[in-house]
Structures are given as structure tokens and as C-alpha cells.
Amino acid sequence: YAFSNCRNLVSPLMAGESLKNIGKEAFRNCKSLSGEIVLSPGLSEISANTFYGCTQVESFVLPESIVMIGEGAFSQCVSLKKINIPRNITVIPNEMVSGCRCLEGVLAIPEKVVSIGDSAFESCYRFTDLKLPQNLESIGREAFYGCSGLEGTLKLPEKLTSIGISSFYECSRITGELILPDKLEVLSYQAFRGMGIESLVLGENVKSIGDG
């Protein structure tokens, strides 16, 4: 909470390589932060809700040294157009950029990611393309809820075992054939509701299909 609600803070200087961690809610609701924020090159961890509600920031540049991002770290940054996900991240946290409705273009999840958290990309409706990593094992509840700008076919990784409730709810522009991987056993409630797919191939181990 170090600088939480410092509504007149315009530009934090975070260039020193000695900075390793930014604490919980450190810059939450700093409404005057704007433009591009470049984080320190030696940073390894961003805690929960660090930049939550920084509504004027348009770009975050994250160093590749980061290995952990806390939940809601960039949530509700409603002007955010661009953010990179460091390649050594293995878990996309809950609500990482939820409500960041200006994020656009291709959403490419790094290859080391094995889990995408609940509501991680909820309502990021300007993304047009989604690339999931081959090592991905689980997709959380409402992870891509309302990402209505996603287009084309959705390719699910073969290692995927779990898809949460409403994870792709109303992704209406995703079309073509949806192939469910063989390791997937349970399809959760409304997981693909409102999607524009034209054909479906069930994996050989699917045991349950949820409502909706």
C-alpha cells in the first residue's frame, strides 16, 4: 500500500536494478499515472493489485526477469492498450488484466505457462487472436469471459485437463471446428456458451458435459 491512492502521482521512477519486488497494492488507484510505465530491469515479482485501477496508463513494459505476478496486478487499467507477459511466467494469476478493455491485437501466452487463473482476461474484448501454449494444463473460471473480439478457430493444447465455468463465455467470433483434447475429462457449466463454432470433436476421455 506504499503509494496507494496517491492520485496526483504522475510518474514513478523505477529504473534501479536493485528493485526486486513491488508490494501489494503499491500503486493502486494512482489515477494520474499515465502513458508508458517501464518497470525496473531486475524486477522479479509484482504483488497483488499493484497497479489496480491506474486508469490512465496506456502501456506497461515488464522486464523478462519477472517470474511471478500477483492477482489483479493490472486489473481495471481501462486505458491500457499494451502489456507484455514475461517469458518465464508459469502462472497467469486471477484477474491479471480483467476489465482492461483497450488491450488489443494478438494475445500470446508464453510457452512456460501451465495455468491461467480465474477472470484473468475477462472483458478484454479488443483482443483479436489467442495463442495458447502447448504446456497449458488448466484454464480458470471466466478466464476469457466476454472476449468477444477473438476471431478464427480456437486451438486447445493437448495437455489441457481442466476448463473452468464460463471460461470462453460469449466469445462469439470464434468459429470453425473445436477439438477437445483427450486429457480433458470434464466440461464445466457454460464453458463455451455463445461461441460461433460450427463443429465439435470430443476428446476420448470426456466424462461429463456441464449445463448451458
Image (cartoon, rainbow, N blue to C red):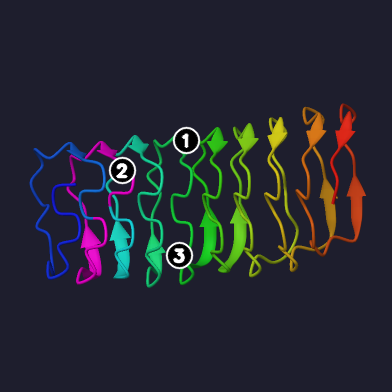
Name the residue type under label 1.
Answer: Val
Residue that numbered label 1 is attached to: 91
64 sits left or right of 143 in the view: left
Q: In the image shown, does 172 or 118 lie closer to the viewer?
A: 118
x 58%, y 68%: residue: 125
The residue under the point 72% across, 63% down is 170
Q: Amino acid at mark 2?
A: Glu
Residue 161 placement: quadrant: top right
Residue found 21% across the figure and 58% down from its top = 38
Crowding near the residue tagged with mark 2, few <14, some 14–19, many ≥20 C-alpha atoms within 10 Å: some
Provide the residue designation for mark 3. Answer: 100
Q: What separation in Å lies between label 1 and label 2 (alpha carbons)? A: 15 Å
Q: Which mark is residue 154?
A: none
> Which SS type dominates the magenta stretch?
loop
Mark 2 and mark 3 in contact? Answer it, CB < 8 Å.
Answer: no
Residue 180 position, x and y percent, is 81, 40
Q: Secondary structure at mark 3?
A: loop
Between disc 1 and disc 2, the foreground one is 1
Ranked by sequence position, the earlier of labels 2 and 3 is: 2
**Relative to residue 91, is residue 124 depicted above or below?**
below
**Which residue type carries mark 3?**
Cys
Q: Position of residue 70 (x, y in %)?
A: 36, 40
Question: Which residue lies under the disc numbered 2?
Answer: 64
Q: Nearer the viewer, mark 2 or mark 3?
A: 3
Secondary element at tag 1? strand
Distance from Cα at disc 1 to Cα at disc 3: 19 Å
Kindly identify the residue that appears in the image at 78 percent across and 31 percent down: 184
Nearer to the camera, 23 or 57:
23
Q: Secondary structure at mark 2?
A: loop
Question: Which residues, given as a range, are shown in magenta?
Answer: 28-50
At which x and y percent is residue 192?
A: 77, 53
